[in-house]
Image (tube, helix red, strand yellow):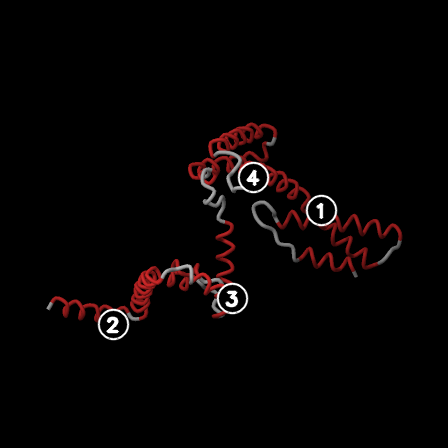
Amino acid sequence: MNYTATIRAVLQLKGQAPFQLAGLEVYETLAQIDASVTRCLQNHAHPLLEEIRTLAQRRHTWDETYQTIHRRQELVLGLNSILAVPRTSRGWYTQTGAEVAQEVDQFLDGLSALKIEQPDDASFIDHVIRRTRDWAPGLFFCYENPALPRTNNGLEQYNDTLKRQRRRITGRKGTADYITRHGPYVVFFDPNESADQVLARFRQVSAPEFRAERKRFVVAQDRQRRIRSFRRDSDRFLQRTEILWCNDTA
């Protein structure tokens, strides 16, 4: 039945904080289902539809909470709309960093004045203003240099992909040691690349550059091996180090 599928879909909703909150979407989707089921019941009664409507109407328990969160999300979305400056066909932003900074200042001033009309949101507004002011010194450089990403969302998504792939291979939940061990070289591994794509990338690198980078990689790997060796047996590691030191100074 279609309506049971809609309930399953609601249970699988995932948001994307801070702009797409799952709780708000669940509430609004349940309101849609409630209205639709109510229209159907006016034409023909059915016990399952009655049960679905009862389930959807339980959202009213959170009516006040929904209104508060929705209202505050609108404030955050207003700030985001200022920072989401469009680009030209050549990739340059249509506003300078100084222009965006001025708009943000004006927006924050408006938020501050809004506390009089919305006293219940005063602490939230103060938090938004304070955090934005704290981030402001480094917030607007990206508009002067298109090569700088405006957010780190792309990097976070890549990290999530990397962690999932590593867990799939090893079965281990933790991936911090793997990332620490291989350092910046981890980013060169893309599980979605084919062998031909990897070879094509390698062909863009000259042999001297490859050898120099491989030497740096070996040094980095050796450093991590020493760290792991010390963690496994610190006494033995220190004894070997003392022997090597004595042999070198003899």
The answer to which of marks 4 and 2 sits earlier in the sequence is 4
Asked whether the residues under the numbered discs 2 and 1 touch, taking CB atoms below 8 Å apart as contact, a structural biologist would say: no
Find disc 4 in the rendering and name its residue.
Answer: 86
Residue type at tag 3:
Ser
Q: Rounded to the nearest whole Å, what is the CA distance between mark 4 and mark 2?
A: 59 Å
Residue type at tag 2:
Arg
Question: Residue 190 at x, y = what percent?
Answer: 48, 62
Q: Is label 4 or label 2 in front?
A: 4
Using a 10 Å C-alpha cutoff, classify the residue at mark 2 as few (fewer than 14 neighbours), some (14 to 19) or many (20 or more): few
Residue type at tag 4:
Pro
The answer to which of marks 2 and 1 sits earlier in the sequence is 1
The answer to which of marks 3 and 2 sits earlier in the sequence is 3
Asked whether the residues under the numbered discs 1 and 4 touch, taking CB atoms below 8 Å apart as contact, a structural biologist would say: no
User: Compared to 225, does 102 lie above or below?
Assistant: above
Q: Nearer the viewer, residue 87 or 59?
A: 87
Find disc 1 in the rendering and name its residue.
Answer: 60
Q: Quadrant of residue 243?
A: bottom left
Question: Residue 48 at x, y = what percent?
Answer: 81, 59
Left or right of residue 219: residue 130 = right
Look at the numbered disc 1 and give the secondary structure of its residue.
helix
Look at the numbered disc 2 and give the secondary structure of its residue.
helix
Q: Rounded to the nearest whole Å, what is the CA distance between mark 1 and mark 3?
A: 51 Å
Question: Which image quadrant: the N terminus?
Answer: bottom right
Q: Nearer the viewer, residue 123 or 250?
A: 250
Find disc 2 in the rendering and name its residue.
Answer: 236
Res. 194 mark:
3
